[in-house]
Image (cartoon, helix red, strand yellow):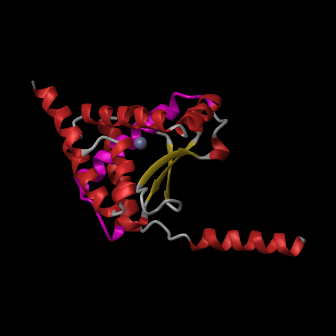
Amino acid sequence: MFVVLWAAVLTLASCAQDAPPLPSAIERIVRDHVASLISEDFQDLSGLTLEYRPVVESSDTVFFETYVKTSTILRHPRRRTYQLFVNPRLAVDFPGHEAVRAILAHELFHIRDYLGKNAWQLYRLKRNYEDETFRQQYERHTDQRTLRLGYGPGLIRYRQWLYGAIGDPDKIRYKKQMYMTPEEIQSWLARQQR
Ligand SMILES: [Zn+2]
């Protein structure tokens, strides 16, 4: 039994090692955009510890994702480590700087939300996020905050690129349901200009 368990542990450990690392060129691009976004639009996030990690799960559909590092969740919000997961596939299929900047602004709004929550509130957010109706409202609200900062054109480019990168029609349909589509962003922008 012990041997079997130990073998399972070793297998898990080697799987983790097999995860493709985040290519340094992509990490540099993302870091640079995050640094300039923080200095321009997210000064409240300045001084936080951010960790850049490769997306491992759902890497066919997830390109950027933000979390609080679990082991730091009980700390004062400003002393936690915030993790930005980035898909290594971006090294071979890159949506362009404008698109990357827009989606990173969306992700930084999530970090701003986490910063305003204690451990119990973060746990509740994680639980609520499992509910699709909540998730849809939360993600679309985050998109709208991103648009208000002026990143609409970039977000349109990102979503257009995303649908092409995903390919699978069912998974694209799901993304269109959860997040604003290029058409919806376009009409949101048109409404603001009236
Ligand atoms: Zn989001």
**Residue at 64% across, 32% down:** 119
- The answer to whether residue 100 is above or below residue 131 is below
Which quadrant of the figure contains the C terminus? Answer: top left
- Tally the marks: 0
The residue at the far front in this view is 170
Residue 146 found in image quarter: top left
Q: Nearer the viewer, residue 1 or 14?
A: 1
Q: Main secondary structure of the magenta part?
A: helix
Q: Say which of 77 and 63 sits in front.
A: 63
User: Which residue is the extreme one toward the left?
Assistant: 194
Q: On the image, which quarter does residue 112 sit in?
A: top left
Per the image, is 94 magenta? yes
2 drawn magenta: no
Residue 42 in view here: no
Q: Is residue 116 above or below residue 186?
A: above
| Residue 150 % position (x, y) | 21, 36
Quadrant occupied by the N terminus:
bottom right
Give the answer, above or below, for where 99 lies relative to 112: below
Q: Is residue 30 visible?
A: yes
The answer to which quarter of the image holds residue 18 is bottom right
Q: Residue at x 33, y 37 (%)?
A: 143
Image quadrant, ligand 1: top left
Judging depth in this view, the residue of 6 and 40 nearest the camera is 6
Residue 115 in picture, x, y percent from top left: 51, 32
Identified at 47% across, 32% down, the residue is 113
Q: Is residue 126 left or right of residue 166?
A: right
User: Residue extending furthest top?
Assistant: 194
Residue 43 locus on image (x, y percent): 37, 33
Magenta span? 91-118
Residue found 48% across the figure and 46% down from its top: 66
